[in-house]
Amino acid sequence: LEFRRVLFRSWRPGMPIHCLVLLLCYAIGCVVTAWYLVRWRTGADLRGMHSGTTGARNAGRVLGRGGFVIVALLDGLRGLLAMFLAAAFGLRDWWLTAAGLAVLAGHLWPAQLGFHGGKGIAVSVGVLVWLLPLRTAPEWTLAGLLLSLVLWRSEEHTSELQSHSDLVCRL
């Protein structure tokens, strides 16, 4: 009974449009760039290759460094686009955060791919750029250096894991 009272007290006239915008953000997240690009370029299903995820890193393993960069940029732009549309439709405060989570959920669990998507790193970066904008050159420089370090370390870790798995396969 208390839950219903809180729910109806927080209900506002604009809420149906807010819910539709959240569905739109989820749909934007479901446009899994890596899967479509790999499918277009090679005809293969990215989910059956390497790590099995549909993210930029796995696309980079199939298409090379250029494929990784293209997918990472487009995924980040998808996050930004969803946030821009949510703000344009008037979503504010926690609704805007929910829009970011919806686009991320669309990337992680795309309905058309059997709810098997990527890890959401580039989409999260796009959402966070909208929610926490960097305003000065030193902030952008620091963010770029940190992102480069994370990507470099994870690539190093991935190649280390691949060398260990090669060794185990040889035994």
Image (cartoon, rainbow, N blue to C red):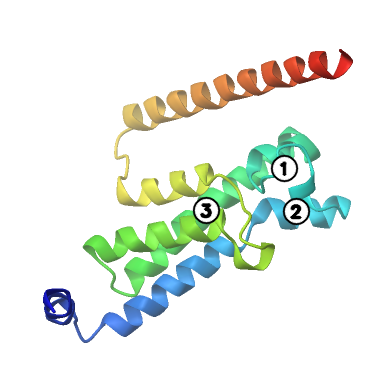
Give the mark, 2 or 1, whose residue is nearer the N terminus: 2
Q: Measured along the vertical axis of the image, is residue 83 above or below residue 169?
A: below
| x then y, percent, for residue 106 | 53, 61
Q: CA distance from mark 3 to mark 1?
A: 17 Å
- In this rendering, position of residue 155 left or right of residue 16: right
Location of the N terminus by quadrant is bottom left
Q: CA distance from mark 2 to mark 1?
A: 8 Å
Q: Measured along the vertical axis of the image, is residue 44 above or below residue 147?
A: below
Residue topped by disc 2 = 37
How many discs appear? 3
User: What amino acid is labelled 1 in the image?
Assistant: Ala
- In this rendering, position of residue 14 left or right of residue 158: left
Q: Measured along the vertical axis of the image, is residue 79 above or below residue 8?
A: above
Badge 2 crowding class, 10 Å Cα cut-off, few under 14, some 14 to 19, many 20 or more, is some
Location of the C terminus by quadrant is top right
Q: CA distance from mark 3 to mark 2?
A: 15 Å
Classify mark 3: helix, strand or loop: helix
Q: Which mark is residue 59?
A: 1
The residue nearer to you, when weighing 99 against 165, is 165
Which picture quadrant has residue 28?
A: bottom right
Residue topped by disc 3 = 77
The residue nearer to you, when weighing 136 against 35, is 35
Give the mark, 3 or 1, whose residue is nearer the N terminus: 1
Which label sits in the foreground, 3 or 1?
Answer: 1
User: What amino acid is labelled 2 in the image?
Assistant: Leu
Classify mark 2: helix, strand or loop: helix
Which residue is located at x 43 percent, y 62 percent?
102
Classify mark 1: helix, strand or loop: helix
